[in-house]
Amino acid sequence: MNPDSLPSWWPLFLTVLFAAALSHAIWNSNGPRALLEEAGARLVLLAAVFARLHHLPKRRGWLLNQVRSAAIGNLHVISLVGVFIGMIFALQAGIELARFGQQDQIGPLVAAGIAREMGPFITALVLASTYGSAMAAEMGTMSVSDELTALEVMSIDRISLLVLPRVVALAIVCPAMTVISDMVGIIGGGFVASAQLGVGWDLYLDSAFSSLSGLGQTIPIPKDVFGGLFKAFCFGIAVALISCASGISARGGALGVGRATSRAVRDATITIIVANYFLTWMIYR
Amino acid sequence: MSSDGSAPVVRIKDLHKSFGDLHVLTGLNLEVHAGECLGIMGGSGTGKSVALRHVIGLMEPDSGTVEVFGKEVAALSAKELRALRRRVGYVFQEGALVGWLTVEDNLALPLRERGKLSESEIKERVAEALETVHVTGAGQNFPAEISGGMKKRVSIARALITRPELVLYDEPNAGLDPEISRSINALMREVSDKLGVTSLVVEHRIECLKRVADRVLFVHEGKVMVDEPTESFFQPSHPRLRAFLGYQPEPAR
């Protein structure tokens, strides 16, 4: 897009939008300082997790447990959501393309859209709302019932024990589930394309997968797929980190756990959406 | 200094702590000597638990000093504080057992994290700890599946399993019925006598301190008002303590 073709008021519109969002965030927190402290605490937690990556062999049992419960517990949700996203995508694109007699382009469009955007995006949102919220509630309950303090008093490294396995688990599970989401999404799009839009099943699949077959120069995976998986990797880390940080900071009994859980889902959702824009710009510009 | 000339295990000097406008500790002084079981008694909100949290380094004083094993807690580095905490056991009011671990895994956790014992030695130590607190047979249960009294016993076992030199009890009788309280008190005394650990017990139940403490302090308005051996503490002459213990109404001020 040529920036000169944008209306003259767009910078003002963006500024007002950001200001409104920021004001609302400050109003919802305990002031700008608390907001900055919270953001800072999450970055510090991320750094602390990276600094403990060498503890992973010791934590492999808990890591496997986390991977198992995140993957198995959400497989059906991600499959169901993924197939319907593919169907919706195909239907929306197909209706428009049919007006120009271009239905045979549905396959590449659905494949690229799902592999680049919808697969990682939807997978991360599902994991944030299901597994992330559970993680925040679990950590929050541990916090308000003095379990985290007990670990501290016993000189047990809470980040290594609790946060590291969760962050690494979602960094693995989110891309893995994205592959599944991509596949069922493309297949779901194929059902709609062949059943409702008159595109042959073989033609749809051939065109969809051939559009994804161009290998990247650095990594021998199609760039659309690799870009999507990289996004999922980042989203997974963000979801786990935000959920753990929100849970750890929970105070004040059941009410505090509830607040921490909703804050985790809200912040993870915003982070996924905002990060998605910047990652897309970085990978595909 | 104690009567034998050794430095106290815990020494709190002129400790002040406020939360906003609420002045909880207003010059608390106390000493706990090696092998002693010191009880701290006082009404709710008088800062007993706050004092305990200073001893383990969970809070920093506004002013005053807290020394444990001769080291000022607030001046310790993170590494030194971790080393100090390894010498201390802490029994939380609600037990604070890790909910997603079984009783056995809860007990094994601090040992596994220290990484000094083999798995068979850890199992042996866990079995021994469960026997000490009379909770054999519940090792495979999760904390949510056992009673409040058992949780408290397991919590005591967890505090003792690393063989600490000092154990801090935060209201060990809270939420327990009289019968279970008696068994917990007997257990605390047994642990104190058998293992010879120094203990600091925050409690406002008379029966508990009568049973377990060698000496009792009465904390009122953030400072120590009475410091007596257990026997004489419960035959008080101080009017405020007499009123607190229910021996006579507090005289009108």
Image (cartoon, coloured by chain):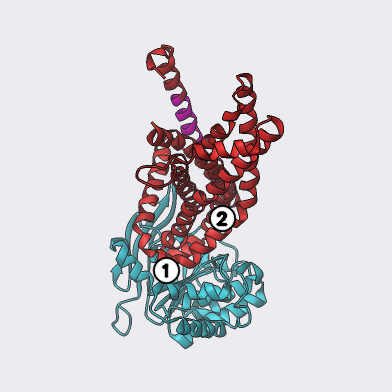
Chain colours: A red, B cyan
**Residue depicted at 48% across the width and 83% down the height:** B125
**Residue depicted at 56% across the width and 43% down the height:** A182
Residue B214, above or below B245 = below
Q: Amino acid at mark 2?
A: Ala
Q: Which span of residues is magenta-colored?
A: A18-28
Identify the subunit bearing mark 1. Answer: A
Is A22 included in the stretch rendered in magenta?
yes
The residue under label 2 is A70
Name the spot of residue B49 as percent of width and height, x first: 48, 63
- Say what secondary structure mark 1 lies in: helix
**Residue depicted at 30% across the width and 67% down the height:** B80
Number of other residues with Cα within 10 Å of mark 2, as a class: few under 14, some 14 to 19, many 20 or more: many
Count all numbered tags in the image, as a single digit: 2
Q: Amino acid at mark 1?
A: Lys
Q: Main secondary structure of the magenta part?
A: helix
- Say what secondary structure mark 2 lies in: helix
The residue under label 1 is A58
Residue B136, above or below A219 = below
Residue A84, above or below B3 = above
**Is residue B234 at least partly visible in the picture?**
no
**Is residue A10 at least partly visible in the picture?**
yes
Is B145 left, or right, of B223 in this rendering?
right
Q: Front-most of B62 and B148?
A: B148
Q: Front-most of B246 and A154?
A: A154
Q: Quadrant of the N terminus of chain A?
A: top left
Disc 1 from disc 2: Cα separation: 20 Å
